[in-house]
Image (cartoon, coloured by chain):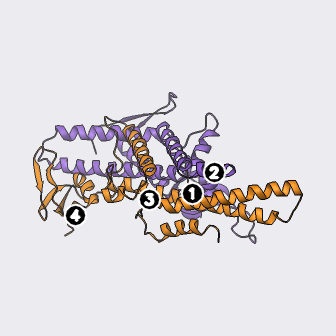
Amino acid sequence: MTEEPDFLGQDSDGGSEEVVLTPAELIERLEQAWMNEKFAPELLESKPEVVECVMEQLEHMEENLRRAKREDLKVSIHHMEMERIRYVLSSYLRCRLMKIEKFFPHVLEKEKTRRDGEPSSLSPEELAFAREFMANTETYLKNVALKHMPPNLQKVDLFRAVPKPDLDSYVFLRVRERQENILVEPDTDEQGDYVIDLEKGSQHLIRYKTIAPLVASGAVQLI
Amino acid sequence: MFCEKAMELVRELHRAPEGQLPAFNEDGLRQVLEEMKALYEQNQSDVNETKSSGRSDLIPTIKFRHCSLLRNRRCTVAYLYDRLLRIRALRWEYGSVLPNALRFHMSAEEMEWFNNYKKSLATYMRSLGGDEGLDITQDMKPPKSLYIEVRCLKDYGEFEVDDGTSVLLKKNSQHFLPRWKCEQLIRQGVLEHILS
């Protein structure tokens, strides 16, 4: 795809884990993150390393294109590839922003109650954006309506007013690593809890809540 | 009946098709707030009456008025919030500068909310790395080709392409231009993508 042989991604916490990814692997990671984010009902863990590396990759490609001869066929193909990568990255980030805006009180509460060491669903910039969105909206509602209302009604608890993401919604997935003994809760009262095994490569339609941790660990891929 | 005006606000938005922003119903909002004030004052006096005279027959009325107050608040906040969502969609559809027709439908406070939202979004996009960050309001559709055939729908004037040459966008002229440059103009209705 490009002339760059290796790519260095670093743990966003500054931990000394260095992961070396080829560009192809990086793009695959991006596409996986993109599909998971599109199909998951809630905001997933943020992947700032992937975003950063892809941005660097795009810059490298742009550099190379600028230096290349104009009539070369390679130029068009690389340019097209760049456009595609940029589309996937933009779509991924847009999807995340939409979820942040849609569930903003819940997203912020989750971040507030997050324990140290637990991965965050928000990058620092997304967190700033979410806080600003909340402040902006709260101030607006207060100034336009709430402060003109009777004193005992002036506070609106946005956490209760804004709907939570529906974790019971069904998602399609493909299994990447074999899983055993997944506990499935019943839909109706007649069925009891039952246990299933997920075979590698199989595809399922299942409630998101049941497999949410597997999405986070990469054991399954939402499709 | 109480809450009629509040319901009207909600119905007004419900009737407007998705993406459309009707004019801000300042009058309607004011009437709802006035009704709320009246209800609250009536409740205040009834509560005092109940406390001082020990009557209990006023309590159902007090409860009923309180429910109406809550309903009024819920409808009002729903109306305002739904409008904010539509305004937010305008940023993604039209870009930073809104057409005048739409601006007239927004209240001053909505405009302020929009400006703050714009700023927040711009700060976020700039932080995405590289010199200028990444404009994620572009590239809304998967790219099919590098260059596309477009027809100009309105007179736009000079338009500069990457290698420095500029193109005169006159109504009905056709051009073969890089896709990413045209995206914004297509969304604004200046250019039309010709699908052969």
Secondary structure beneath label 3: helix
Left or right of residue A139, residue A67 in this image: left
Please tell me which of labels 1 and 3 falls first in the chain: 1
Which residue lies under the disc numbered 4? B193
Amino acid type for the residue under numbered disc 1: Val
Which residue lies under the disc numbered 1? B77
Secondary structure beneath label 4: strand
Q: In the displayed structure, would residue B182 be above or below residue A8?
A: below
Say which chain tag 1 marks.
B
Say which chain tag 2 marks.
A
Please report contact status of discs 2 and 1: CB closer than 8 Å, yes or no: yes
Amino acid type for the residue under numbered disc 2: Val
Residue count near mark 1 (Cα–Cα under 10 Å), binned few <14, some 14–19, many ≥20: many
Chain ID, purple in image: A
Q: Nearer the viewer, mark 1 or mark 3?
A: 1
Quarter of the rendering containing residue B75: bottom right
Secondary structure beneath label 2: loop
